[in-house]
Amino acid sequence: MSLSCRISHNVYSVCSSIKHQPLISGLKTLIVTPAIKLMEIDMRRTAGLFIPVATMILIAAALLYRTEISRMKTVRKTQQNASVRTAEIFIEAKLRDLDKDLLYLASQYQLQTDAGDEGMTRLINLWLPFSRTKKIYDQIRFLDETGMERIRINYAPDGPVTVTQAELQD
């Protein structure tokens, strides 16, 4: 047997010293030899190696993605907890300040109301500078046991103003 190889317009042939096996495909004839079968075996071996390696790479990528998402959630949760804690500290401080102010106003009330109307005038004179200094209260009011306003100090842009007896509410 001689080795001969030729390629024509419609015929593809593969050289081999082993018996040729023709395969007809449409208008072209392909002569398949054991060398092509060896290529098929090599392709199977390559695919047999590629698929497990590709699968391991995909699994590793998925695990890495999952770990990164978990880390990002943890960071976000830590940041949110820090923000909540900061707000909690701020609110507690404001409430402590309000508590101190209420205790101050209540102590002034106890000292001044024993003297009747004159005590109420002194109470107004104590609460006006308090309102002017604090600048955070729109109104400071004293309500009697029946719910009637006895004193009201409104904070205005020009400073605190005492409301007249006629304007007090029940």
Image (spheres, grey):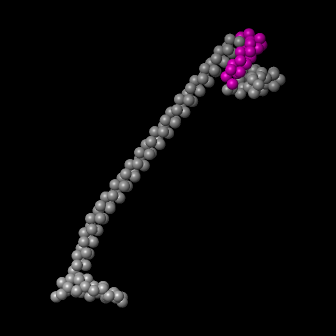
Q: Which residue is depicted at the point 25% across and 78% down?
A: 36
Residue at x 23%, y 76% (from the top left corner)? 38
Q: Quadrant of the C terminus?
A: top right
The residue shown at (75%, 27%) is: 157
Where's residue 45, x and y in %? 25, 69
Q: Is residue 146 visible?
A: no
How many numbered discs sit on the rendered protein? Answer: 0
Q: Residue at x 34, y 88 (%)?
A: 10
Q: Relative to residue 157, is residue 68 drawn left or right?
A: left
Side of 90 where 155 appears, left or right: right
* In the displayed structure image, the side of residue 72 where residue 150 appears, left or right: right
Which sits in the foreground, 168 or 157? 157
The part of the image, by quadrant, that contains residue 87 is top right
Res 61 visible: yes
Quadrant position of the N terminus in the picture? bottom left
Q: Position of residue 76 (x, y in %)?
A: 47, 42
| The magenta stretch spans residue 36 | no
> 58 left or right of 101?
left
Q: Is residue 118 magenta?
A: yes
In this view, the residue farthest toward the right is 166
Q: Nearer the viewer, residue 123 or 16?
A: 16
Q: Is residue 49 above or below residue 158?
A: below
Which quadrant holds residue 145? top right
The residue segment tinted magenta is 113-135
